[in-house]
């Protein structure tokens, strides 16, 4: 393989730039040419493709977002769209592709491989919801952004003796809520992977109030429902003043943490090694601090799970 491509797709995440950098530099290290595709699969269909040099990825390792931009593309979900994309790759003489993105982007990568075009997935999403890896690129940064925000909310919650409901991102995955809730000593963590007992939440809040607790923090993953509705129900049931903060897109931005930069560098470089080794239709990941790879189909067929021991611990520590 003498020429490969790289793109970012779906929701962006901090550390994607570090992953692009690793793909470009590792390929050039192996004397392989690299082409960057802008705007994900949409740019691939349009042929928005440019050669990248060592300098193209200079000064980006610490920047959030993605210099290749990202997009969602309905056309790519059709066979016709996929064929157009492959025709563009062939036109540029590209023989393999690295796709940095979430599970939707992985489905696209799988389709390219099924059509005979070797593609490797690199997990880039703040949701940490890709099976086959303990961590996705961007999760640690987003986690620290949430922690920082909750720390600030805690100050005002204490001053006003209020209950705060904080809605964090995670449509289908509660990792961000669980980790930030545990890291911030939240009274209650509500995630899509676990049933919750509303009455038990209310009793716990009341018990806290009775023993003179100045505030309560409840972290809700967006996948469970609206933080505002949750807050309204809490206020009605407890008669405590309750405020709601939806953290929203600030969770996607910012300079990647050291952990994310190192993870992105390792996974990006590994993707290049796998492509050059003739692998296709696989996703790279990290498990127990070792780089691993799995068949994308197999990874996507496994449901996302949370760490039950951690969830139990969060409950035990918030009695
Ligand atoms: P993420 O990768 O962050 O999960 P999306 O789910 O929006 O983001 O997926 C990103 C893009 O991947 C979509 O806009 C589409 O172009 C492509 N994609 C998603 N699902 C499929 C599919 N089943 N087949 C082909 N392409 C897909």
Image (spheres, grey):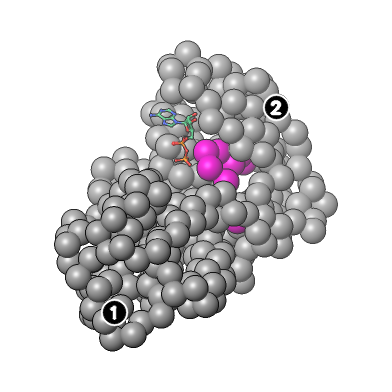
**Magenta stretch in the rendered image:** 4-14
Query: If the picture is divided into quarters, which one holds ligand 1?
Result: top left
Instruction: Reply yes or no: does residue 5 show up in magenta.
Output: yes
Q: Is residue 147 visible?
A: no
Q: Is residue 11 depicted above or below 268 in this figure?
A: above
Residue wearing tag 1: 208
Residue wearing tag 2: 48
Quick one: label 2, few (<14), some, or many (20+) residues within 10 Å? some
Q: Is residue 191 left or right of residue 262?
A: left
The C terminus - image quarter: bottom left
Please state the horizontal and vertical placement of residue 122, each as a whole percent of the image: 50, 50
Residue visible at 52% across and 77% down in the picture: 159
Mark 1, mark 2: which one is toward the viewer? 1
Please state the horizontal and vertical placement of residue 8, each as a whole percent of the image: 59, 41
Q: Nearer the viewer, residue 59 or 247?
A: 247
Q: Nearer the viewer, residue 48 or 196?
A: 196
Q: CA distance from mark 1 to mark 2?
A: 57 Å
Regarding mark 1 in the picture, which secondary structure is present there?
Answer: helix
Report if the CB atoms under discs 1 and 2 are less than 8 Å apart: no
Upstream in sequence: badge 1 or badge 2:
2
Q: How many numbered discs? A: 2
Q: Looking at this rendering, what residue extends furthest in the bottom direction? A: 211
Please state the horizontal and vertical placement of residue 298, each as a whole percent of the image: 28, 45
């Amino acid at each position: 393989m003498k020429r490969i491509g790289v793109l970012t797709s779906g929701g962006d995440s901090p550390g994607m730039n570090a992953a692009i950098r690793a793909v470009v530099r590792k390929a050039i290290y192996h004397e392989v040419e690299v082409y960057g595709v802008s705007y994900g699969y949409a740019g691939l269909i349009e042929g928005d493709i440019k050669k990248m040099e060592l300098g193209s990825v200079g000064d980006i390792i610490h920047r959030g977002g993605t210099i290749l931009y990202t997009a969602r593309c309905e056309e790519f979900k059709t066979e016709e769209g996929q064929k157009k994309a492959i025709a563009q790759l062939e036109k540029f003489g590209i023989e393999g592709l690295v796709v940095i993105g979430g599970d939707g982007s992985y489905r696209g990568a799988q389709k390219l491989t099924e059509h005979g075009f070797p593609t490797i997935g690199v997990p880039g999403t703040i949701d940490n919801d890709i099976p086959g890896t303990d961590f996705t690129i961007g999760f640690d940064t987003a986690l620290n952004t949430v922690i920082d925000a909750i720390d600030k909310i805690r100050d005002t919650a204490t001053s006003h003796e209020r209950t705060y409901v904080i809605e964090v991102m995670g449509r289908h995955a509660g990792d961000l809520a669980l980790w930030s809730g545990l890291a911030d000593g939240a009274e209650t963590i509500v995630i899509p992977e676990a049933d919750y007992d509303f009455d038990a939440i209310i009793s716990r809040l009341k018990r806290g109030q009775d023993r003179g607790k100045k505030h309560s923090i409840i972290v809700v993953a967006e996948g469970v429902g609206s933080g505002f509705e949750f807050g309204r129900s809490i206020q009605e049931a407890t008669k405590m003043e309750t405020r709601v903060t939806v953290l929203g897109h600030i969770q996607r931005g910012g300079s990647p943490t050291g952990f994310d930069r190192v993870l992105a560098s390792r996974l990006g470089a590994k993707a290049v090694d796998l492509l050059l080794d003739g692998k296709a239709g696989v996703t790279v990941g990290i498990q127990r601090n070792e780089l691993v790879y799995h068949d994308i189909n197999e990874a996507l067929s496994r449901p996302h799970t949370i760490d039950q021991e951690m969830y139990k611990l969060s409950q035990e520590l918030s009695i």
